[in-house]
Image (cartoon, rainbow, N blue to C red):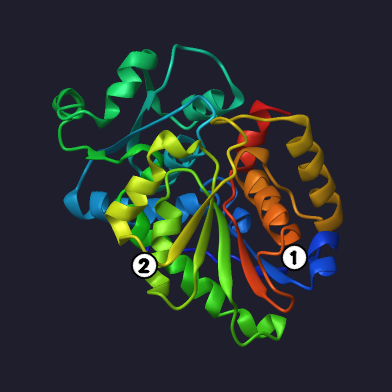
């Protein structure tokens, strides 16, 4: 087995009252169960980066995120497990959160960029001073985005198709998942190659550039984007939190509100609006991120 072999994500039935009422069959691919620390879609996003870093003999990994970042949390854990030093470039100013405490415990060196400095991450030359400071380190885009991350996420489709028979299914009609950077969605679109449509529920506002990033990776077809941001990045409200609580009780599956919860609520709205005909079979992707719940619970 390869050092970076992907762990198994179980495919389970998703039974919720509003799905039953609409005659929709749904399954949930539990990426939250692949690993206690390198959780959810992060394993898939990071795999190609870890392979490239190992093959290049890179001493460390460096990437960006916020103070509740699931990506940095998984990256720091992967670095500790596989013997890479890690550096995190963080949005904003120093503050302690449960996630930041974990990053330090995993041995990640933290640099706080402020808000203006973090906004510069898309500018040409952003990485140059960090590559000079950490020569030979492998740089990973924010959220594990980009083609390498998408190619890793393409492997998610294999895990789903290999388990359809356990549900008595021979096929499914579409995917539904949260989209933060759009990388996971792009990976599914790459793997599906037009066979099944992929619905991405935008957990960030439409002006955050996700549509442009996905189009740059996979073109303009094979997917549909839906605004599930509820008015802002990391925006929570009582309706969303109550929905997540109810869904957790019915399905007996832990969720987090910022991504998976928003995506599931957007799916309910679309189902109740009649977007899917009775008998439709949907695969809902649980993208993990449960450690981030500590930021709002």
Q: Nearer the viewer, residue 286 or 207?
A: 207
Q: Earlier in the sequence, mark 2 or mark 1?
A: 1
Q: Quadrant of the N terminus?
A: bottom left
In the displayed structure image, the side of residue 285 where residue 66 appears, left or right: left
Q: Does the CB distance between marks 2 and 1 fall below 8 Å? A: no
Q: Looking at the image, which residue is at 56% across and 16% down?
A: 96
Q: Quadrant of residue 274?
A: bottom right
The answer, for residue 146, to whether it is visible in the render is yes
Q: Quadrant of the C terminus?
A: top right
Q: Position of residue 5 (x, y in %)?
A: 42, 65
Q: Position of residue 140 (x, y in %)?
A: 30, 41
Dot 1: within a 10 Å radius of its alpha carbon, few (fewer than 14), some, or many (20 or more) residues? some
Q: Looking at the image, which residue is at 27% across and 23% down?
A: 120
Q: Looking at the image, which residue is at 46% across and 53% down?
A: 43
Question: Helix or strand or loop: what does disc 2 sit on?
Answer: helix
Question: Helix or strand or loop: what does disc 1 sit on?
Answer: loop
Residue annotated with mark 2: 190
Q: Looking at the image, which residue is at 52% across and 24% down?
A: 100
Q: Nearer the viewer, residue 291 or 241?
A: 241
Q: Nearer the viewer, residue 181 or 128?
A: 181
The answer, for residue 148, to whether it is visible in the render is no
Residue annotated with mark 1: 14
């Amino acid at each position: 087995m390869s050092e970076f072999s992907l762990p198994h994500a179980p495919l389970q039935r998703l039974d919720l009252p509003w799905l039953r009422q609409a005659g929709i069959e749904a399954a949930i691919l539990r990426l939250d169960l692949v690993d206690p620390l390198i959780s959810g879609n992060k394993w898939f996003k990071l795999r190609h980066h870890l392979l490239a870093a190992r093959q290049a003999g890179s001493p460390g990994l460096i990437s960006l995120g916020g103070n509740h970042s699931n990506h940095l949390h998984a990256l720091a854990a992967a670095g500790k497990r596989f013997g890479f030093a890690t550096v995190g470039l963080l949005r904003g100013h120093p503050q302690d959160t449960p996630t930041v405490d974990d990053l330090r415990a995993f041995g990640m060196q933290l640099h706080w960029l402020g808000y203006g400095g973090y906004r510069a991450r898309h500018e040409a030359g952003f990485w140059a001073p960090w590559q000079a400071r950490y020569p030979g380190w492998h740089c990973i885009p924010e959220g594990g985005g980009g083609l390498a991350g998408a190619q890793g996420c393409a492997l998610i489709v294999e895990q789903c198709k290999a388990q359809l028979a356990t549900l008595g299914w021979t096929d499914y009609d579409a995917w539904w998942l949260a989209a933060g950077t759009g990388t996971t969605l792009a990976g599914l679109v790459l793997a599906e190659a037009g066979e099944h449509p992929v619905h991405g529920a935008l957990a960030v506002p439409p002006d955050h550039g996700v549509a442009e990033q996905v189009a740059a990776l996979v073109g303009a077809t094979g997917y549909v984007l839906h605004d599930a941001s509820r008015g802002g990045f990391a925006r929570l409200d009582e309706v969303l939190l109550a929905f997540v609580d109810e869904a957790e009780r019915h399905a007996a599956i832990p969720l987090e509100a910022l991504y998976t919860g928003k995506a599931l609520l957007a799916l309910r709205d679309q189902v109740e609006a009649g977007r899917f005909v009775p008998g439709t079979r949907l695969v809902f992707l649980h993208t993990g991120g449960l450690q981030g719940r500590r930021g709002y619970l």
